[in-house]
Image (spheres, helix red, strand yellow):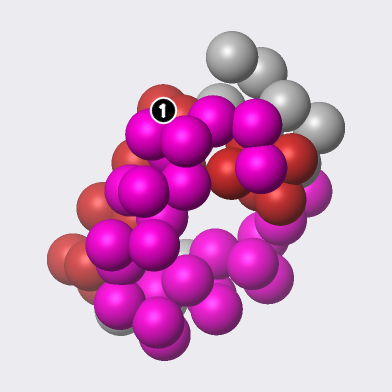
Amino acid sequence: MKAENLQDLIRRSSSTRQYFMSLPVPDQMELHRYNEHVKTADQLHRYAEYLQSNGRL
């Protein structure tokens, strides 16, 4: 599913919302900074994996 942005994605997909909420709060906050760039669950997973291995986007 392609959404308008991260907020739209986590609002429309319960599985994506669950995944997002399972991330550490600092990662959630960092991802919100890139709200307009995260439009699919795949993008969310890739950004989150990058954050977890590198600390920041």
Q: What residue do we see at 55% from left, 78% from top?
A: 29
As helix, strand or loop, the secondary structure at mark 1 comes to helix
Residue 8 at x, y percent in the picture: 74, 40
Question: What secondary structure do most residues of the magenta stretch adopt?
Answer: helix
Q: Is residue 34 magenta?
A: yes
In percent of the image, x 18 and y 66: which residue is there?
A: 53
Residue 27 appears anywhere in the view: yes
> In this orientation, which residue lies closer to the viewer: 57 or 4?
4
| Highlighted magenta segment, given as a residue range | 11-38
Q: Is residue 37 visible?
A: no
Position in image of residue 57 (x %, y %): 47, 67
Q: Which residue is mark 1?
A: 42
User: In the image, is residue 56 above or below residue 17?
Assistant: below
Is 33 displayed left or right of 45 in the figure?
right
The one nearer the camera, 31 or 57, is 31
Q: Which residue does the image show at 41% across and 28% down from the upper left?
A: 42
The crowd level at tag 1 (other Cα within 10 Å; few <14, some 14-19, many 20+) is: few
Decide: is 35 above or below 10. Answer: below
Q: Quadrant of the N terminus?
A: top right
Rendering quarter of residue 39: top right
Q: Residue at x 59, y 44 (%)?
A: 10
**Residue 24 in which image quadrant:** bottom left
Above/below status of 1 relative to 46? above
User: Is 27 or 13 nearer to us in this picture?
Assistant: 13
Amino acid at dot 1: Asp
Asked whether residue 29 is drawn in magenta, I would say: yes
Q: Quadrant of residue 12?
A: top right
